Image (cartoon, rainbow, N blue to C red):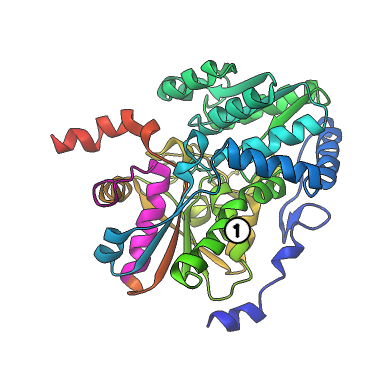
Amino acid sequence: MNTQLKTTMPDFNAYPDARGRFGSFGGRYVPETLVPALDRLQEGVRRYLVDADFQAELVSELKTWAGRPTPLTRAHTLSKRWGAEVWLKREDMAHTGAHKINNALGQTLLAKRLGAKRIIAETGAGQHGVASAAAAARMGMPCVIYMGAVDVERQSPNVGRMRLMGAEVVSVTSGDKTLRAAIDEALRDWVSDPNGTYYSLGSALGPHPYPYLVRELQSVIGKEARAQIQLQAGGLPDVAVACVGGGSNAIGLFHPFVNDAGVQLLGIEAGGRGSGLGDNAATLTFGSPGVLHGTYSMLLQDKFGQVQETHSVSAGLDYPGVGPEHALLQSCGRATYESANDEETLEALMECAKYEGILSAIETAHALVGARRYARANPGSRILIGFSGRGDKDMPILQRTVLKDLL
Ligand SMILES: *Cc1c(COP(=O)(O)O)cnc(C)c1O
């Protein structure tokens, strides 16, 4: 079936096209004032991303500072319990505790090459903020992080981490006071000084060339995992599973497998507390096409096109949009997307902690739910899970939920 599929699939390496499109998705929907900055970034990406000196510095920093390659771990007990062969690609072992560092480090190196004097970034849960602050400190650049006032409140340990690494954290009190408003504010800052400032965007979304740039920087996950699983398991997986917020860890895992017809790609979104608008952040599962933050992709919006607030137990998946490349992979049937609700996610997190001795981020636990579901439907299959991050940051919410129930 999969080989049949392949003959009808587009050539994924042809995306994004010259206009920054992934099929009909992606592109650049921005005010005129942002166009010169994006053109400059695009030229920088074209010039430096494949440049030998740039790549050498990136590879060296990833290895000696950020801890790559991350291990591929066989989950012995989950394999037994689920009746499948389960492998974890351990981004929780990367510096600052998640895959975010791959992107933040790469963009900060690019900013240096482009002659920028300061880094700005947005953050929701704080993970991209922490990674950006760390990378900026390492490269000796000042850093400003925009964060919604609501998130500053509920993610205070991460605010402290950013400040310790020398970043200025700006609490955004406009709009919905969460990630959406923080991105708007960062874009506003960038427009006011597009040459001196570099905007480091945290997921595979936004206007071209960000979805492409972030995918390329995160593809290190899938490239390593593809080689490791062949070596350690003796072949490719039947499926690669990852959680999807904006979609950066998932596209980083998926992309190196996109031409392997025998490898299914499965993205798991935040199903929250139900299927109603406002009760989840499952954009590809429940959304419809539209424009948000400069890109045409799937969105959670009402019938008037008003973008809706989202709900998820994991702050890192709590975003009403998704990267345009996922919208393409879904529309042509190359990848499928499902959701996991808050309750089953917390349960999977506990199962993995108890039986593998690994505390996952709540975001990551969504992928565990999808993997377990796949295992039950496909006994004996080989499953590769993108283990996007560790759960230390989630202790306050775990104290209030699962640990309370355990007492
Ligand atoms: C930020 C984050 C995510 C969600 O972001 P993507 O861009 O969808 O990868 C998932 N897991 C962890 C641990 C995160 O920090």
Which residue is located at x 32 percent, y 31 percent?
A: 395
Q: Nearer the viewer, residue 288 or 218?
A: 218
* Residue 386, image x, y percentages: 47, 54
User: Could one spot residue 275 in this view of the protein?
Assistant: no
Q: Label 1 is placed on what type of residue?
A: Lys
**Which residues fall within the magenta stretch?**
353-376
In the displayed structure image, the side of residue 23 where residue 387 appears, left or right:
left
For residue 357: magenta? yes
| 170 w.r.t. 327: above or below | above
Q: Nearer the viewer, residue 344 or 99?
A: 99
In the displayed structure image, the side of residue 235 where residue 325 appears, left or right:
right
Which residue is located at x 66 percent, y 47 percent?
A: 217
* Residue 127, image x, y percentages: 51, 33
For residue 36: magenta? no
Q: Name the residue under label 1.
A: 223
User: Could one spot residue 329 in this view of the protein?
Assistant: yes
* Residue 70, image x, y percentages: 50, 48
Dot 1 crowding, Cα within 10 Å, few <14, some 14–19, many 20+: some
The quadrant in which residue 133 appears is: top right
Q: Can you say which quadrant of the picture contains the C terminus?
A: top left
Q: Nearer the viewer, residue 159 or 111?
A: 111
